[in-house]
């Protein structure tokens, strides 16, 4: 595990509430939409998001175990969630919900990379350099994992995020049309960006 200096630190289970919110911010409401479908009786969508963030899903997902947060003394205000993708494409089963298929296809194009699943900050903590610093930390985590490339998927409407990624060297490798079903979002395309530091 790489060493970090304040205000950056490895996430802990107690960050689950903030991580769920930051995951949803990064996903432009897509995670909350999915969590609503996953909720059990008596459980809210946010309960699902917090449960997943507090879980031990080491190989993927939004687990705190895959997260680095920015903590200026009052809890997480920004986060990076990432992990290594498998080395070979994973078959996409016929029962996979259609809205996930484009993203899974793009992940299959990025096999063997360190995948940035989430990069987000609360509104009042943006434009302070945390995004760039967290992307630098992602490169350290990539190297610590023995990998040589980074990848991420971003919506075509996330213009500010794409400008940041392109400014630090990410380039588009592929894209897929979104399948929205009943998710309301202005985007039309998922874009896979990669970087070889």
Image: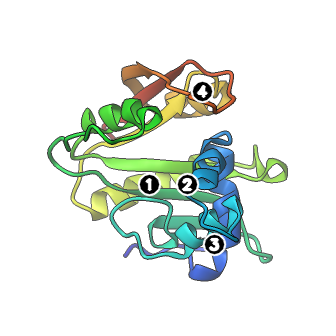
Quote the CA–CA distance across marks 2 and 3. 18 Å
Q: Mark 2 touching mark 1, by CB under 8 A?
A: yes
Sequence-first disc among 1 and 3: 3
Q: Residue 163 carries which label?
A: 4
Quote the CA–CA distance across marks 1 and 3. 20 Å
Q: Name the residue under label 3.
A: 16
Relative horizontal placement of residue 55, taking residue 70 as reference (left or right):
left
Q: Mark 2 points at which residue?
A: 134
What is the crowding at mark 1: few (fewer than 14 residues within 10 Å), some, or many (at least 20)? many
Any part of residue 37 in sight = yes
* Residue at the outermost front position: 41
Figure coloring: rainbow
Sequence-first disc among 1 and 4: 1
Q: Is residue 83 above or below residue 112?
A: below
Expressed as whole percent of the image width and height from the top left, the position of residue 36 reads: 64, 53
Q: Residue 179 carries which label?
A: none
Expressed as whole percent of the image width and height from the top left, the position of residue 139 reads: 39, 52
**Regarding mark 1 in the picture, which secondary structure is present there?**
helix
Q: Mark 4 touching mark 3, by CB under 8 A?
A: no
**Regarding mark 4 in the picture, which secondary structure is present there?**
helix
Residue at left 43%, top 38%? Answer: 100
What is the crowding at mark 4: few (fewer than 14 residues within 10 Å), some, or many (at least 20)? few
- Looking at the image, which is closer to me, 142 or 37? 37
């Amino acid at each position: 595990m790489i060493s970090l200096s304040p205000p950056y630190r490895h996430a802990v289970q107690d960050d689950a509430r903030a991580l769920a919110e930051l995951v949803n911010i990064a996903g432009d409401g897509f995670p909350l939409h999915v969590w609503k479908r996953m909720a059990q009786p008596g459980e809210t969508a946010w309960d699902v998001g917090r449960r997943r963030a507090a879980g031990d899903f080491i190989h993927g997902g939004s687990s705190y175990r895959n997260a680095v947060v920015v903590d200026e003394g009052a809890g997480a205000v920004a986060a990076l969630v990432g992990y290594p993708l498998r080395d070979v494409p994973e078959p996409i089963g016929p029962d996979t919900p259609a809205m996930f298929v484009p993203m899974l296809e793009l992940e299959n194009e990025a096999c063997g990379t360190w995948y940035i699943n989430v990069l987000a900050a609360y509104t009042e903590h943006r434009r302070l350099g945390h995004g760039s610093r967290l992307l630098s930390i992602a490169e350290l985590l990539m190297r610590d994992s023995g990998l040589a490339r980074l990848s991420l998927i971003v919506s075509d409407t996330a213009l500010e995020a794409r400008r940041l990624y392109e400014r630090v060297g990410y380039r588009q490798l592929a894209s897929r049309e979104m399948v929205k079903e009943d998710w309301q979002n202005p985007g039309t395309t998922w874009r896979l960006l990669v970087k070889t530091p």
